[in-house]
Amino acid sequence: MILDFTEFRRVIENYIKANYTETAIKYENVDLDTSDLDEFIAVFDKPSFAESTGMGETSSLTGGNLIIQIFTPLNTGTDRAREIADILATALDGEVISGVALSTPELHASPNSTEWYQTVLQIPYITVMGQESLC
């Protein structure tokens, strides 16, 4: 069982670090110098719901989306972004990581910046978060 959002973040980041080495990884609110990079990914999560697992329980069923932005050079086509998405999807699709169940990834276009072509891999997740029952 995941205890809190901090542990959730740690579990997901450690899993990605251990299973993805294709590009540099930018984590939420952590600086990454991209001036010398040709490509990289950025990882963050977006919790979207939580509901109690029952009366008197101190845990909740929590779900949301793991969001991975894929950054590749502008004007070079979409193949490389899709290759990176495929690598990530293979590593994450259907995995259960320390009680976090990941679902099927979805690939979405994203508005491009003036520097990067951006694609977003969105992976729904669900987990039980909190402490064991006090009852």
Image (cartoon, helix red, strand yellow):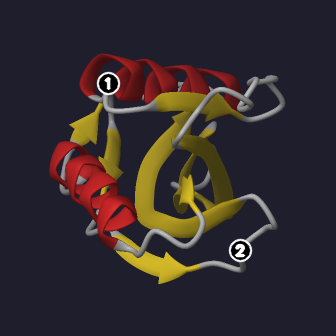
Who's the residue at 29% across and 48% down the image? Answer: 88
Q: Amino acid at mark 1?
A: Thr
The quadrant in which the N terminus is found is: top left
Q: Which numbered disc flags the more N-terminal residue, 2 or 1?
A: 1
Percent x, y for residue 10? 55, 20
> Label 2 sits on what residue type?
Asn
Residue 133 in sight: no
Front residue of 89 and 80 = 80
Position of 117 compared to 99: left or right? right
Q: Nearer the viewer, residue 118 or 28?
A: 118
Q: Which residue is mark 2?
A: 112
For label 2, the SS is loop
Q: Check disc 1 and report the residue beneath it.
A: 21
Query: Which label sits in the foreground, 2 or 1?
Result: 2
Q: Quadrant of residue 131?
A: top right
Point 43% across, 56% down: residue: 126
